[in-house]
Image (cartoon, rainbow, N blue to C red):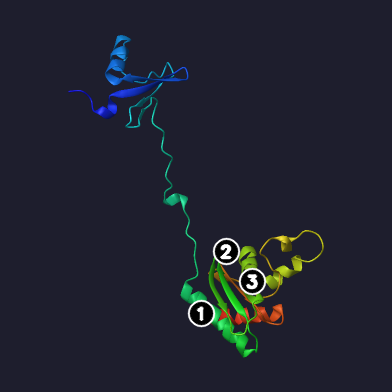
Amino acid sequence: MPPPAAFTTCTLQRGGRLMEYPLMVLEEKMKLKGRMALVGVAAGLSVVAGSAGLALAGGPAATAGKAPNAADTTQVRVLKTDAAVQIAQATIDAAEQGGHHVTVVIMDRSGQVRVSLHGDGAGPQTDESAKRKAFTAVSFGQPTTALAANAGGTNPSIRDLPGTLFLGGGIPITINGEIVAAIGVGGAPSGALDHQYAEAGLAATR
């Protein structure tokens, strides 16, 4: 029985020229030379079988990369959404009791915003302020009030890092000594008040 039509011809590339042969004729030519393969690796030949697009190639199969296992991973604690919302709302409430309107951002250890709560009457600039304070606190693991002392002067310093803001109102959130998130508050007349409201929000969940 003759081979299927899709495999009755093949194209042989030799010396930059493509030559088409009937498959059976080419096999006979190879047999005469003592070869049964359609690809002559030593001769540097490349064979593509007919219109089926079947590529035949020599050489060993590629070695698959080593897959990671449990020993190559680590666990990271993340503040639950319910807890983050509770802290943010308690902060908003504390600020309102003090007669101020603020925005609160809770950011996790990787810099992802978990909660952003814009208080009634808070200015549009407070969203960015709160976010940058939270980012600064979680990045350096210290309250922004403590970091502000190292951000002064005219020489290059940590204040030049994109996304940071060294004003009071950013505080890391720790659980059993491990930083899991940070709170950032913006909108009060001073950084000291923003810090005070952030502390009040954290205290409400302890």
Residue found 47% across the figure and 17% down from its top: 15
Mark 2 is surrounded, within 10 Å at the Cα level, by few (under 14), some (14 to 19) or many (20 or more) other residues, namely some
Q: According to the image, label 1 marks what residue?
A: 86
Identify which amino acid the numbered label 3 is placed on: Glu
**Quadrant of the snapshot with the N terminus:** top left
Q: Position of residue 201 (x, y in %)?
A: 57, 81
Identify which amino acid the numbered label 2 is placed on: Gly
First reached walking from the N terminus: tag 2 or tag 1: 1
Q: Image quadrant of residue 135?
A: bottom right
Task: Find numbered disc 3 in the image and state the secondary structure of the residue it sits on.
Answer: helix
Q: Give above or below for 22 relative to 54.
A: above
Is residue 206 shown to the viewer in this render? no
First reached walking from the N terminus: tag 3 or tag 1: 1
Task: Find numbered disc 1 in the image and state the secondary structure of the residue it sits on.
Answer: helix
Q: Nearer the viewer, residue 95 or 47?
A: 47
Q: Is residue 200 left or right of residue 71?
A: right
Q: According to the image, label 3 marks what residue?
A: 128
Q: Image quadrant of residue 7?
A: top left
Discs 2/3, front: 3
First reached walking from the N terminus: tag 2 or tag 3: 2
Judged from this view, the residue extending furthest toward the left is: 1
Q: Image quadrant of residue 125?
A: bottom right
Residue found 81% across the figure and 64% down from its top: 153
Q: Nearer the viewer, residue 149 or 157?
A: 157
Mark 3 is surrounded, within 10 Å at the Cα level, by few (under 14), some (14 to 19) or many (20 or more) other residues, namely some
Mark 1 is surrounded, within 10 Å at the Cα level, by few (under 14), some (14 to 19) or many (20 or more) other residues, namely some
